[in-house]
Image: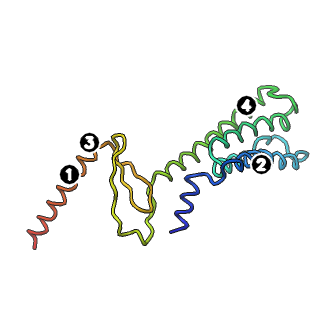
Amino acid sequence: MPVVGTLKRWFARPPVTGRWAIGATVAAVAAPTFIRCLVDSAISGVALSPYLPFVVMAALLIGWRPAVATALASAAVADMLFIDPRYVPMAGPTDLFAIAVFLVCAALIIVIVQSARVIVENCPGPLPREHKATGIIFSLEKGQAWASWSGAGNLRLGPESEVATMMQDFLAQLEVGKRLVGQAK
């Protein structure tokens, strides 16, 4: 269980922050640029492809804002260094199309990672063995009912009025069940 909790915490909050995040963002642009330079004489037509895995890693390890910076910087560097005519920014419609496709793919990657991060952060996880006997804590915040328990995040149940009605119905059903079981004995 500690591994699940560690992974959940790591995914919920990017592990690289502060000054390290700036260095990681620069590295996320520099590494694929270096790789692309190594194969430049043998490979053409894939100026932006090596940058996509680094956008994924930036989104996972640094967060969505640095991942956006990584994608934008990658598009600019690749356009200048690897799309003909070289050293000319946005030279023609081919450049614009390639960069637009790259940026759309990068945006989708970042949105998917960020959405998964929000889902993981807001979903309750499995309880560690030592906390199995603890109860559920209900709370109210800004008109929304929430449930939480040890070892898990908060779970939004819905608007206060709807949840209160559902809870009353649940308790009434429990009473009916108890009466029916009592009559059956």
Q: Which mark is residue 161?
A: 3
Task: List x then y, in percent, for residue 40.
Answer: 88, 45
Q: Three-letter amino acid code at disc 4?
A: Phe
Which residue is disc 2 drawn over?
27
Find numbered disc 4 in the image and state the secondary structure of the residue it sits on. helix
Would you identify the image quadrant in which residue 134 lies? Answer: bottom left
CA gap, disc 1 to disc 3?
12 Å
Which residue is disc 4 drawn over?
97
Q: Nearer the viewer, mark 1 or mark 4?
A: 1
On the picture, is 47 further left or further right than 133? right
- Dot 1 or dot 4, earlier in sequence: 4
Q: Residue at x 36, y 40 (%)?
A: 142
- Dot 2 or dot 4, earlier in sequence: 2
Neighbor class of circle 1 (other Cα within 10 Å; few <14, some 14-19, many 20+) is few
Q: Three-letter amino acid code at disc 2?
A: Ala
CA gap, disc 2 to disc 4?
26 Å
Query: In terms of depth relative to the viewer, which is nearer, 119 or 112?
Result: 119
Find numbered disc 2 in the image and state the secondary structure of the residue it sits on. helix
Find numbered disc 3 in the image and state the secondary structure of the residue it sits on. helix
Q: Which mark is residue 92?
A: none
Contact? badges 2 and 3 (CB < 8 Å):
no
Which residue is disc 1 drawn over?
169
Q: Residue at x 15, y 60 (%)?
A: 175
CA gap, disc 1 to disc 2?
56 Å
Query: In terms of depth relative to the viewer, which is nearer, 177 or 161?
Result: 161
Task: List x then y, in percent, for residue 51.
Answer: 75, 45
- Dot 4 or dot 3, earlier in sequence: 4
